[in-house]
Amino acid sequence: MSIRDQFGFTNNKSSETTETMIEIIKRTLTSGEDALVIGFGKFVVNEKAHLRGRNPAANESMLLIPRKVVTFKVSVKLQRKINTNE
């Protein structure tokens, strides 16, 4: 089911609504905050420290720089729904 079908929006309005929601999530994550979508899950910003790695092509050791990564944690409600096929 699409947003267009669910709410009777036009294609443009449903695209605009979806893009707005994604932009809000992106702005929230960029500011370093977690983004919660109730009933769906949470996008979490995590800090990764320096990490020693290996370049397999050159077979040499290298140091990976600290960085931020985004992970997703599914909500308990959605997890239950997936596992019970409701």
Image (cartoon, grey):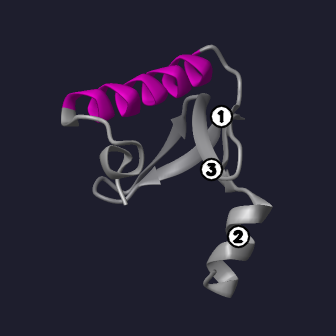
Can you tell which mark lies on residue 72? 3
Can you tell which mark lies on residue 50? 1
Q: Upstream in the sequence, badge 1 or badge 2?
A: 1
- The furthest residue to the right: 76
Task: Indicate which label's residue lies in the foreground, 3 or 1.
Answer: 3
Does the magenta portion include 19? yes
Task: Indicate which label's residue lies in the foreground, 1 or 2.
Answer: 2
Q: Which residues are magenta?
A: 12-30
Few, some or many residues within 10 Å of mark 3 (<14, 14–19, 20+): some
Viewer-proximal residue among 1 and 21:
1
Secondary structure predominantly adopted by residues drawn in magenta: helix
Secondary structure at badge 1 equals: loop
Left or right, 61 with respect to 46, comes to: left
Callout 2, which amino acid? Gln
As displayed, is residue 66 above or below residue 78? above
The CA distance from mark 1 to mark 2 is 33 Å
Can you tell which mark lies on residue 79? 2
Does the magenta portion include 35? no
Please state the horizontal and vertical placement of residue 83, each as a whole percent of the image.
67, 83
